[in-house]
Amino acid sequence: MKLVEFSVKHSLFVNLLSVFLIVAGLFSVFSLRREAFPDVSFDIVNIMTIYKGASAEEVEKLVTTKLEKELKEVDDIENIYSTSGEGSSMITLEISLDTKDKKKVVNDIQKAVDRVTNLPDGVDERPIVTEITSGKIAVIKVALSGDLSEYRLRELTDAIKDRFEDIEGVASVKRTGWRDEEYWVEPDLAKMKDYHVS
């Protein structure tokens, strides 16, 4: 018997089945958990180390290389990328997609970092191990630039940051990119000579 013939002969059954499917669909739509920005793991772990006042070469030799040596012993790491800059080291690890227990790998990474105890004295804090998830990635980034003084740009940035924090649903606002304040002292050589200061 063809479907069309069956539908015509048993119209009550077909109509009831249609109503049931619509009701079941609506129930599913309203009962399923929905998230606008679900927390998704990207199988990436970052290790950040601050070594204030050190050159990029010093950071590479005294921090990054030591950490990489231990991290290479961790199983299920697909790739290791590192960047050594003035005063900071960033190592990014890609966890293998075939890994069954990602939490164990992240714990092993933390243990490998903890085994590096011979970091220089200039490293004030232990390296920070962070598993990257969608909840830790900025949804919106705003860059501020212009012909204003750095002091004025800081003021404007603080004002904008405060406005963003007042918006309902905003979890956090972070400000980055500032240089540390430096002071330039230019002595009056003639006066120094008068006071016999060299």
Image (cartoon, rainbow, N blue to C red):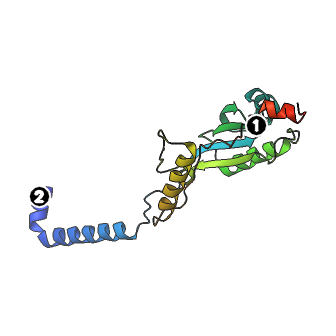
Crowding at mark 1 (Cα within 10 Å: few <14, some 14-19, many 20+): many
Q: Residue at x 48, y 41 (%)?
A: 145
Question: Which of the 4 image quarters holds residue 191?
Answer: top right
Above or below, comparing residue 21 to residue 133 in the picture: below
Q: Is 50 left or right of 15, judged from the image as shown? A: right
Q: Which residue lies furthest to the right in this view?
A: 196
Foreground: 62 or 106? 62
Q: Which residue is drawn at 76% across and 26% down?
A: 57
Label 2 sits on residue: 4
From the image, state whether disc 1 or disc 2 is nearer to you: 1
| Amino acid tagged 2 | Val
Q: Residue at x 47, y 47 (%)?
A: 142
Q: Is 179 left or right of 193, judged from the image as shown? A: left
Q: Which residue is drawn at 30% across and 69% down?
A: 26
**Is residue 178 at all visible to an observer of this figure?**
yes
Above or below, comparing residue 166 to residue 143 in the picture: below
